[in-house]
Image (cartoon, rainbow, N blue to C red):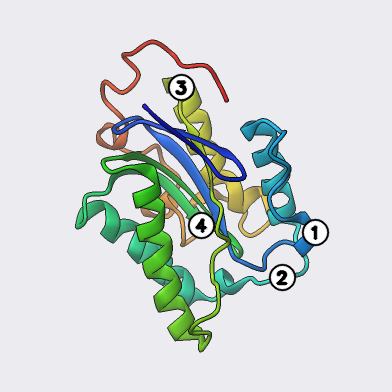
């Protein structure tokens, strides 16, 4: 297991599912970037996600279908071609991305690869080359057990419904729920053996 800290604590283990969230550089007001380091990671995430879903200002580049398509393609490419992770669930919201995956590389490498290539391509597409695209910090949580895994998966795929973008999760094109039209995914994309270890304390 590995641990590192920037503004938020980060704990991960190769092969253990992780819930990762990152957002656009200017998607939050400057005075409301990432919450204070004194908060637990769970509290910090709750605050951040509510702000992102309710944001009425800031960048929403991911609302553009061509940009959202680019992010989805990169998520699948980094899983299937680069083999950086086993993909379990994802959603591309107007100003942020949620990903549930079992990393095959260190989590900082996974995040840097995904954010780096998508920032470069999206900036070129939008004519913003050279400008920061993603906020530097990402939120991540090590998934402790199967119940938490299923809860996070549902949380991710229901995000567009909670935000009022679609009435049903399977109707949102930029989500893992789209491929299955909201039906439970096949067993093969759920982790096997990852939770057969003693549970770890929350950060």
Circle 2 or circle 1, nearest the eye: 1
Looking at the rendered structure, the number of numbered marks drawn on it comes to 4
Circle 4 or circle 2, nearest the eye: 2
Which mark sits nearer the N-terminus, 3 or 1? 1
Which mark sits nearer the N-terminus, 3 or 4? 3
Which residue is at a point 49% across and 53% down the rendered structure image?
A: 91
Gap between marks 3 and 1, in whole Å? 32 Å
Marker disc for residue 171: 4
Q: Residues within 10 Å of mark 3 (few under 14, many from 20)?
A: some
Which mark sits nearer the N-terminus, 4 or 2? 2
Coordinates of residue 145 in the picture (x, y in percent): 44, 20
Which residue is at a point 58% across and 71% down the rendered structure image?
A: 63
Q: Nearer the viewer, residue 50 or 25?
A: 25
Q: Is residue 161 shown above or below 133?
A: above
Gap between marks 2 and 3, in whole Å? 34 Å
Which residue is at a point 40% across and 71% down the rendered structure image?
A: 70
Q: Nearer the viewer, residue 112 or 191?
A: 112
Which mark sits nearer the N-terminus, 1 or 4? 1
């Amino acid at each position: 297991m590995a641990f590192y800290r920037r503004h938020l604590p980060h704990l991960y283990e190769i092969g253990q599912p992780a819930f990762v969230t990152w957002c656009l550089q200017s998607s939050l007001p400057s005075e409301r970037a990432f919450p204070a380091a004194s908060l637990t990671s769970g509290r910090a995430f709750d605050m951040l996600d509510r702000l992102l879903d309710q944001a009425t200002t800031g960048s929403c580049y991911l609302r553009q279908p061509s940009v959202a398509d680019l992010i989805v393609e990169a998520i699948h490419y980094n899983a299937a071609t680069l083999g950086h992770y086993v993909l379990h669930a994802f959603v591309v919201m107007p100003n942020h991305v949620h990903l549930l995956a079992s990393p095959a590389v260190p989590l900082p490498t996974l995040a840097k690869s995904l954010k780096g290539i998508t920032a470069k391509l999206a900036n070129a597409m939008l004519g913003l080359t050279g400008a920061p695209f993603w906020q530097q910090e990402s939120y991540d949580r090590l998934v402790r057990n199967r119940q938490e895994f299923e809860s996070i998966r549902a949380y991710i795929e229901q995000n567009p419904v909670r935000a009022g973008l679609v009435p049903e999760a399977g109707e949102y094109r930029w989500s893992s729920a789209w491929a299955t039209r909201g039906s439970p995914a096949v067993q093969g994309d759920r982790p096997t053996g990852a939770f057969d270890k003693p549970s770890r304390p929350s950060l």
